[in-house]
């Protein structure tokens, strides 16, 4: 599956979540990412774009999701209904597991709430998942 | 115009609906769904108000068959009760199917993670055994419903693998299946619809070197080709040929388009001891150094088949691209570089799926061989008339009946070129159309000294006071120009005269593919009203039966119109005025 041109990881990291809904942790992870985070974010974005490609196969043209960091997924201006979000989550979880080698649950801890805003945009979702990967890898390294 | 598809399920099938509606491949579908979770009410009330062309019924076994749900709790199951519940569900489907062109029922499946009784699963009372029994019973119950197709859901699950079912999607959306499975199901349903609409492929055109056998025959000689033997690649090519032979037995016509020296290639086909396909298995071939696209177009023309009926298989990507570009109507599937995948790739193609299988299909390649002989004899004859007489053609006329039902439907729904109105009808629609006594449909069985072509023509009439109109006039393209079409018209005229009608009309409806039919009617001798594409014969004059064609029995409808009394009865049934003798 082709991956469309996207901003470099560094430019992705330099972008701020500017919709005002992102949580502090989200801002933190974008602003204060380590070099490792940059690597994970890049890999995570690839998986998300790949999942978007697959999701788009079942969507009419006007509802297709753009492969860009600023694309709004849920909330005001979002294109996805609940069925489509669920399908996206299942596709993404499957691909993330194949990429990183451990199972993901993107529905834990109020992932959809407006307070956390993880599913607000592609960027916020990528950051959230990159944090999960980082956390998993750190705990693995410690053990 | 998009075809209408209606989804009925006890779970959320919206993802399937989205996949079907957004798939750009033909035919385009407009999809609607029954209210969430409802199966029985929509089946009971399925009527013209939904105006669906096709209906899909996809249910979970534990929701529809209560006894089966009990098996999940390891309770003792009354198998008679279980079968009775399957029969009740089948009865609902039997009542509902008449209201659409075709109904697709997906066989029952359960997810792989339901281990049921483990090693006892296929023993008495085992979950999997009960499921197999239920599906078999359902298949048997629906066997005589011509337009109901039980689709093998289990195969879809196997193709997608362990992610077919998604517990997360079930809990979040009441959709048990992963989007992958829905996409697979959409593909399968589209293939099923194409099959019902008579759009399946009939002709496989094959390359030779490194496609049908390993190696380049002109370089290595037929003795050194990799085919069969104790060689993994040789075995792969052998299995590919076996799969092609099986297709041929199903009525798919095989042909060759190869850049080669014809004598060398034919020698290989004839002499290699492990060849499964021999010269007689191919209906036509173009083995030369010409452009393959041109050769393919020639083969299709020789076999009187439209390019849209053809599929081209070649190991060479450049040749595939060339044919795709030059002949977009021809289906050119991507083909694996790995030769060990050739047979499985072929067997997985869904373009050969057909809703009917007839004796005529099975003997199609022999019919083309007979056609080649006819063509040789035509070239040897001094005139077309002499040739036609030499064929000793016999036409047997049959009323529409159970014995020819499937073939009549096939001709009606598949024939393009010699087709007056290109009316496409389902089994049920045709039966309904035939119910009034003023409508008749005949099938024409044709044979000559080179072979039996089977039922190759149909003609239907609708009679009103004083006149009749030919509604369907269909002849297999293989027989165009054999004057069988004239014999069919002569038969219709004679019948109409016998029941004392005054005029016989035919109205040509153009489709872009049926110009041969217009040519025939323009030369038929009927008077033509050009503005309406309408042709008329005044029934005071008989229509001449073509020389050399024997209608067998000579007056095929003689038994129907033998006596004035029978004439009178017949005309009365047809609500026709009867002229006094």
Image (cartoon, coloured by chain):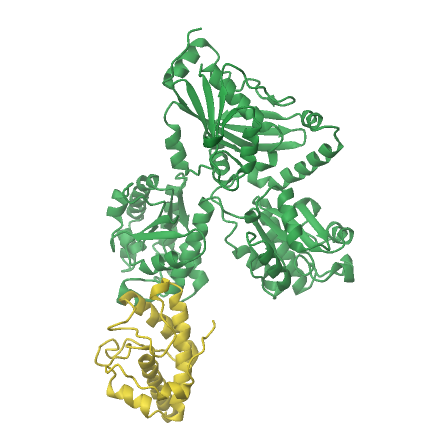
Q: Where residue B342 sits: x, y (%)?
A: 60, 60
Q: Nearer the viewer, residue B432 or B492?
A: B492
Q: Residue B437's quadrant in the figure?
A: top left
B438 horizontally vs B233: left or right? left
Indicate whether A76 appears above or below B128.
below
Q: Nearer the viewer, residue B500 or B309?
A: B500
- Image quarter hosting the C terminus of chain B: top left
Instruction: Give me the residue at 60% from left, 55% from top.
Output: B326
Instruction: Give me the residue at 67% from left, 32% from top.
Output: B450
**What color was chain B assigned in the picture?**
green
B277 horizontally vs B94: left or right? right
Q: Nearer the viewer, residue B452 or B437?
A: B437
Q: Determine the residue located farthest toward the top in the rendered image.
A: B581
Q: Where residue A104 sits: x, y (%)?
A: 34, 78
B85 horizontally vs B21: left or right? left
A36 horizontally vs B547: left or right? left
Indicate whether B523 appears above or below B346.
above
Q: Where residue A107 sits: x, y (%)?
A: 28, 75
Indicate whether A35 appears above or below A85.
below
**What color was chain A assigned in the picture?**
yellow
Q: Where residue B318 sits: x, y (%)?
A: 63, 63
Is residue A10 something that shows in the picture? yes
Q: Residue B217's quadrant in the figure?
A: bottom right
Is residue B115 something that shows in the picture? no
Instruction: Give me the residue at 30% from left, 62% from top.
Output: B175
Q: Nearer the viewer, residue B406 or B321?
A: B321
Q: Determine the residue located farthest toward the front in the rendered image.
A: B531
Count of residue discs: 0
């Amino acid at each position: 599956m082709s991956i469309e041109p996207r901003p470099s990881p560094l430019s992705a990291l330099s972008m701020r979540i500017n919709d005002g809904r992102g949580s502090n942790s989200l801002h933190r992870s974008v602003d204060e990412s380590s070099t490792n985070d940059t690597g994970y974010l890049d890999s995570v974005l690839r998986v998300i774009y790949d999942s978007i490609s697959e999701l788009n196969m079942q969507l009419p043209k006007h509802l297709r999701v753009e492969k860009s960091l600023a694309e709004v997924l849920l909330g005001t201006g979002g294109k996805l209904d609940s069925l489509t979000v669920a399908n996206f989550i299942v596709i993404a979880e499957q691909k993330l597991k194949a990429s990183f080698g451990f199972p993901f649950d993107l529905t834990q801890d109020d992932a959809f709430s407006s307070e956390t805003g993880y599913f607000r945009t592609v960027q916020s979702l990528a950051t959230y998942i990159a944090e999960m990967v980082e956390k998993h890898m750190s705990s693995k390294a410690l053990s | 115009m998009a075809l209408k598809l209606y989804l009925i399920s006890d779970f959320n099938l919206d993802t399937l609906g989205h996949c079907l509606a957004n798939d750009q491949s033909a035919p385009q579908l407009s999809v609607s769904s029954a209210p969430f979770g409802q199966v029985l009410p929509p089946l009971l009330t399925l009527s013209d108000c939904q105006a669906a062309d096709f209906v899909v019924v996809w249910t979970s076994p534990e929701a529809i068959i209560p006894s089966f749900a009990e098996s999940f709790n390891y309770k003792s199951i009354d198998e008679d009760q279980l079968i009775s519940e399957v029969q009740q569900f089948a009865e609902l489907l039997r009542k509902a199917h008449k209201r659409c062109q075709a109904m697709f029922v997906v066989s029952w499946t359960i997810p792989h993670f339901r281990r049921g009784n483990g090693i006892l699963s296929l023993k008495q009372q085992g979950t999997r055994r009960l499921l197999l029994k239920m599906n078999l019973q359902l298949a048997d119950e629906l066997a005589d419903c011509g337009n109901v197709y039980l689709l093998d859901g289990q195969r879809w699950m196997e193709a997608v693998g362990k992610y077919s079912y998604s517990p997360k999607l079930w809990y979040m959306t009441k959709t048990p299946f992963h989007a992958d499975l829905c996409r697979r199901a959409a593909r399968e349903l589209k293939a099923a619809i194409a099959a019902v609409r008579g759009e399946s492929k009939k002709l496989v055109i094959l390359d030779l070197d490194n496609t049908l056998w390993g190696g380049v025959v002109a370089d290595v000689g037929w003795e050194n080709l990799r085919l069969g033997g104790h060689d993994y690649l040789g075995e792969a090519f052998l299995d590919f040929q076996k799969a092609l032979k099986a297709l041929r037995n199903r009525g798919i016509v095989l042909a060759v388009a190869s850049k080669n020296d014809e004598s060398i290639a034919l020698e290989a086909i004839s002499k290699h001891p492990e060849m499964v396909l021999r010269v007689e298995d191919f209906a036509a071939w173009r083995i030369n150094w010409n452009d393959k696209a041109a050769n393919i177009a020639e083969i299709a023309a020789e076999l009187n088949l439209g390019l849209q009926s053809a599929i081209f298989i070649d190991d060479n990507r450049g040749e595939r691209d060339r044919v795709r570009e030059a002949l977009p109507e021809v289906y050119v599937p991507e083909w694996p570089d790995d030769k060990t995948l050739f047979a499985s790739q072929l067997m997985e193609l869904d373009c050969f799926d057909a809703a009917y299988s007839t004796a005529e299909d099975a003997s199609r390649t022999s019919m083309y061989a007979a056609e080649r002989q006819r063509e040789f004899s035509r070239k040897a004859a001094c005139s077309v008339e002499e040739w036609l007489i030499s064929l000793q053609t016999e036409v047997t006329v049959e009323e529409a009946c159970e014995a020819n039902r499937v073939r009549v439907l096939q001709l009606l729904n598949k024939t393009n070129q010699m087709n007056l109105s290109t009316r496409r009808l389902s089994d049920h629609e045709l039966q309904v159309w035939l119910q009034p006594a003023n409508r008749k449909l005949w099938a024409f069985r044709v044979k000559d000294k080179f072979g039996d072509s089977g039922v190759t023509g149909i003609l239907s009439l609708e009679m009103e006071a004083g006149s009749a109109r030919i509604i369907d006039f269909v002849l297999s393209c293989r027989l165009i120009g054999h004057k069988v079409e004239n014999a069919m018209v002569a038969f219709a005229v004679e019948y109409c005269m016998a029941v004392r009608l005054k005029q016989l009309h035919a109205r040509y409806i153009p489709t872009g593919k049926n110009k041969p039919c217009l040519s025939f009617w323009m030369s038929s001798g009927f008077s033509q009203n050009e503005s309406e594409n309408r042709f008329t014969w005044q029934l005071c004059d008989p229509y001449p039966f073509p020389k050399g064609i024997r209608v067998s029995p000579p007056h095929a409808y003689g038994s129907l119109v033998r006596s004035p009394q029978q004439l009178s009865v017949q005309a009365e049934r047809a609500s026709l005025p009867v002229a006094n003798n």
